[in-house]
Image (cartoon, helix red, strand yellow):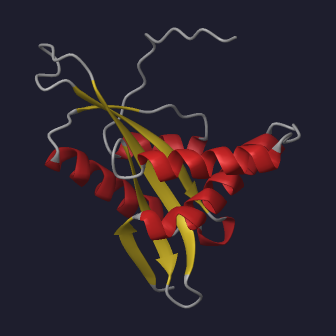
Amino acid sequence: MDLIYKKADINDIDDLVDLKMKQNLFFINRDGLIMENENIVRENIKRILLQELNKTMYFFIATDKENNRAVACSGVIVHQMIPSDSSINGKKAYITSVYTDEDYRCNGIQNILMEMNLRFLKDIECNKIELDASNPPAIKLYEKFGFKKHNIKYILKS
């Protein structure tokens, strides 16, 4: 397996949309649900990526050289917050959309993509990084990189 790893750009948006839809379907199927409005979700993902890619939202992708197909992605959203003692420049990141096609899992792809994410965040001097996780293999990956569970979030669902 020969993969190319890179920071995604405008030419990768359709691949990112496909990977994100596969990720959504993976969790929906896992939870025994049905995706309603699939076309609307797809259109909204593409619209947001066209608007935010490499502005506030950054993605790293792995592409299989043999078939020129994107097989994995990992993204990060960077927010500019008010600076504080714990975040001197106010930058806060949220790791998102960590997904690998089933046929490519357990090959260390997300290790490389996470390293790329973290290197990028270091380069832009963002040291406050969060993520949400419920998938045991993903949790293992995050813990390997030093992430710790922290339960202080409150969520308003409407």
Q: Nearer the viewer, residue 22 or 52?
A: 52
Give how far across and how far down residue 109 sits, in percent.
46, 66
Image coordinates for residue 80, horizontal then vertical, percent: 26, 27
x, y (%) of residue 91?
Answer: 23, 29
The reply to whether residue 141 is visible in this rendering is: no
Q: Relative to the observer, which residue lies in front, 154 or 138? A: 154
Q: Residue sitting at 74 percent across and 50 percent down?
A: 26
Q: Is residue 143 visible?
A: yes
In the displayed structure, would residue 11 be above or below residue 46?
A: below
Quarter of the image where one finds residue 70: bottom right
- Determine which quarter of the picture holds residue 145: top left
Whether residue 150 is situated above or below residue 119 in the rendered picture: above
The vertical placement of 68 against 63, above or below, is: below
**Residue at the spot 50% in from the left edge and 31% down from the top edge:** 132
Q: How many marks?
A: 0
Give the side of residue 72 with respect to residue 78, left or right.
right
Q: Is residue 14 left or right of residue 5?
A: right
Residue at 17% from the left image edge and 46% from the top image edge: 122
Q: On the picture, is 149 further left or further right than 127?
A: right
Query: Residue shown at 14%/40% (left/top)?
Result: 125
- Residues 72 and 20: in front is 20
Relative placement, left or right, of 73 versus 40 is left
